[in-house]
Image (cartoon, helix red, strand yellow):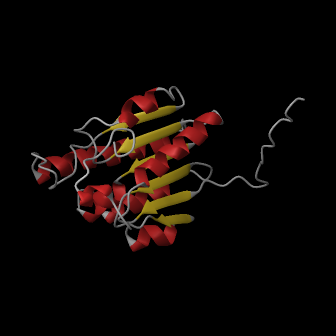
Amino acid sequence: METPPLQCLEPKTKTGLVVVMTGDGKGKTTSALGICVRAAGYGMKVCFIQFMKGDMYSGEIDGIKRLAPNVELNRTGKGFCGIMGNPYPYEEHRANAQEAVKLAREKTLSGNYDIIILDEINNACHLRLVDLAQVLELLDLKPPLVHMALTGRNAPQEVIDRADTVSEIRDIKHAYRRGIEPQKGIDY
């Protein structure tokens, strides 16, 4: 017995959405990576820009390579500013984040992508590595049919107000607080 083909829905009106994943819980970047997998399945082009996670290896680096040429990863940060023993001065973090804003502007306006993901931009804004005006400008530059996802804790209210979809990921329990180290494939 043959399985019938899966139904694929098409919206009557295509709209480029602004999606925000924020909150203090684990899973904001993981949710954005899920968007990448789903979009690649449709043959869509995704540009994933990491604003803060540039100095440590994570499985998503090689995982995204497997989604090429549909998904492109740009690692622009110097790690998490001011935590986890990060050795880089604030000025260097800000300079890298400013380069990431320029890259995001260029990629958004290029016409080459269906989805732009700005990973940890909310946190970068909270730490003043990027300015709120720069984040709002990126939202203004987004073409009408391009989707844009912004991740990171502490999303500014102005970004939340402009978004179409906002998910807050709440921390209820985390293995790290029980002394369990981060685990490959789950935490990084």
Q: Position of residue 23 (x, y in %)?
A: 39, 66
Q: Is residue 5 above or below residue 122?
A: above
Which residue: 41% across, 50% down? 29
Q: Is residue 156 above or below residue 108?
A: below
Which residue: 40% across, 36% down? 60
Of the pair 138 and 150, the residue shown nearer to us: 150
Q: Is residue 184 visible?
A: yes
Q: Position of residue 107 (x, y in %)?
A: 45, 40
Q: Residue furthest right?
A: 1
How many tags in the picture?
0
Quadrant of image for the N terminus: top right
Quadrant of image for the C terminus: top left
Along the horizontal axis of the image, is 151 left or right of 147?
A: left
Of the pair 115 and 174, the residue shown nearer to us: 174
Which residue: 44% across, 48% down? 30
Which residue: 9% across, 50% down? 89
Along the horizontal axis of the image, is 142 left or right of 180?
A: right
Q: Is residue 128 above or below residue 36?
A: below
Q: Position of residue 172 (x, y in %)?
A: 38, 68
Q: Is residue 142 visible?
A: no
Q: Position of residue 78 (x, y in %)?
A: 21, 43
